[in-house]
Amino acid sequence: MKILVPVKRVVDYNVKVRVKSDHSGVELAGVKMAMNPFDEIAVEEAVRLREAGRATEVVAVSCGTSASQETLRAALAMGADRAILVETDVELQPLGVARLLKAVAEREQPQVVICGKQAIDDDANQTGQMLAALLGWPQATFASRMTFGEGVVNVTREIDGGLETLELKLPAVVTADLRLNEPRYATLPNIMKAKKKPLDVVAAGDLGVDIAPRLRQVRHAEPAARKGGVKVADVAELVNKLRNEAKVI
Amino acid sequence: MKTLLIAEHENGRLATATLNTASAAARFGGEIDVLVAGYGCDAAVAQAQAIAGASRVLKVDAAHYAEPLAENLAALVTAIVADGGYRAVLVGATSFGKNLAPRVAALLDVAAVSDVVAVAAPGRYERPIYAGNVMVAVESDQPLDVLTIRSTAFDAAPLGGEAAVQVVAAGPDLGLSRVVGRELSKSERPELGAASIVVSGGRGLGSGENYHRLLDPLADKLGAALGASRAAVDAGFVPNDYQVGQTGKIVAPGLYVAVGISGAIQHLAGMKDSKVIVAINKDPDAPIFQVADYGLVADLFEAVPTLVSSLEAA
């Protein structure tokens, strides 16, 4: 069984992002970048499945500029077997990425695609579902557990009311939530080994799909900052303030 | 112009997020069709009819909609929209809506807009990115937009309407997936996403036992819903559906009481639109104090029981 894992290069989750002064976007110059944390969870799950003998090959794929090679090397260092960069300078939106991934999936014929449930930059939470739709495959979003049976995968999902377990016919798309696993740190020997693993670069244009952005992000702004309030001395003062000042109890 | 509002319902009850989403649909200014797909879903249909502003309720009743599976529902919505006339498809940004909307959009070959917090006009929306640290104005020239709506940003539509019911033929049963298990948290408390008061606990509570021993009485006293930080959920104190934050539930109650929560950016993303925020934490430098209206630097193991008894005394 082959597993395809899409990974995205995003601003590191520890970075406090700043809006550019002309409101055209977020300042990315000189900002630390990293693999989207949910994609790390997806890579980890795929690598564990290969280590357990369930999967035979883990292929990481990223869509974007050549800088995304760094993200793919990180996936290889975690244990992915090979990587594909779908290279483009076009601003990618989820539908465009899903179209590119569909083309890659048709070439690679994986049994499962494991995506992160959302990227922490645009917080769209769309690409996995869109890919499943375009392929006509079943989907399980927000996965916290995956187990495989004959021709099926059972996925426990974190939903608003609790947990739900779906049985999906393979091939299928699964999107990883926080509690699916804890991703490993790549060791130095594995980082060195990753440099020698195959990384193919495919020009997005060669895949013959429309990736033009459909939406215009016309203005970025920081939300009105919430003002810190006061410190109260004790519980009695807190209750008094809530009752007589804020009037919320 | 008309919009299609996809209703979310369970056990004969409409989700409250559907009412908030109806207010977003009303911003388009046209007719609103409410789609209720289910199996034996008359009770949900009746509630949908009552949504003020709804023009008609599209009822689709078939066994393969007994569970809200994305594959079958997306195929159905696509077929309904293909009949034409819709400017937008809206659904709440709940786990149901987030699962469904992108699938619908891709089948319709349009982009989706997630977590919409403002509809300035048809095709002009606002949404948060980077865990709510940046707001972006989005414009679309698409003939049809697919949106998920953040329910805390829109008031619930009032009830009292009497929309007509139109029975619509079921779509195909694709048979790609099925539900094989469900563990839903049972609680007598208000729903976390819609409660007017939320009491939330973090890692500072130390254990699930402490969480419930300290916070249950406080929530009882305040009539509050219970929530938690990701750290508390990861540590196993409470189940996943308690989680408030960027990747959990987004809440904006009148009063949010954060107990033993340090205030990681991911948590603040889920609660910083609350009207009044109270933080109880022994670390005076905890980031939660930067957003709290009332901060109490104290040992929560003493402060919370004292708070409960002083609420009792009143």
Image: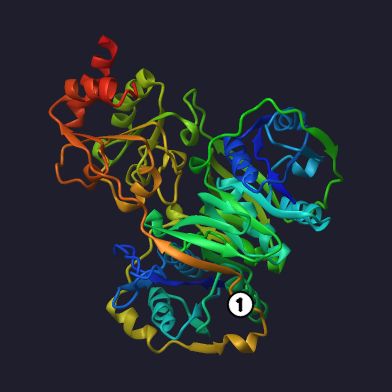
- Residue B160: percent from left, percent from top: 68, 25
Residue at x-position 52% and y-position 60%: A124
Instruction: Report the amino acid beneath label 1.
Output: Ala
Q: Is residue A183 visible?
A: yes
> Could you tell whether A234 is left or right of B68 in the image?
left
Relative depth, front residue between B296 and A212? A212
Graded by Cα atoms within 10 Å as few (under 14), some (14 to 19) or many (20 or more), the crowding at tag 1 reads few
Residue at x-position 65% and y-position 34%: B10
Residue at x-position 65% and y-position 40%: B8
Q: Chain of mark 1?
A: A
Element at label 1: loop
Relative depth, front residue between B18 and A64? B18
Q: In the image, is residue A209 above or below residue A117?
A: below
> Could you tell whether A133 is left or right of B207 in the image?
right
- Residue A238: percent from left, percent from top: 21, 25
What residue sits right under mark 1 in the picture?
A212
Relative depth, front residue between A122 and B214? A122
Q: Is residue A172 visible?
A: no
- Asked which quadrant contains residue B296, the reply is top left
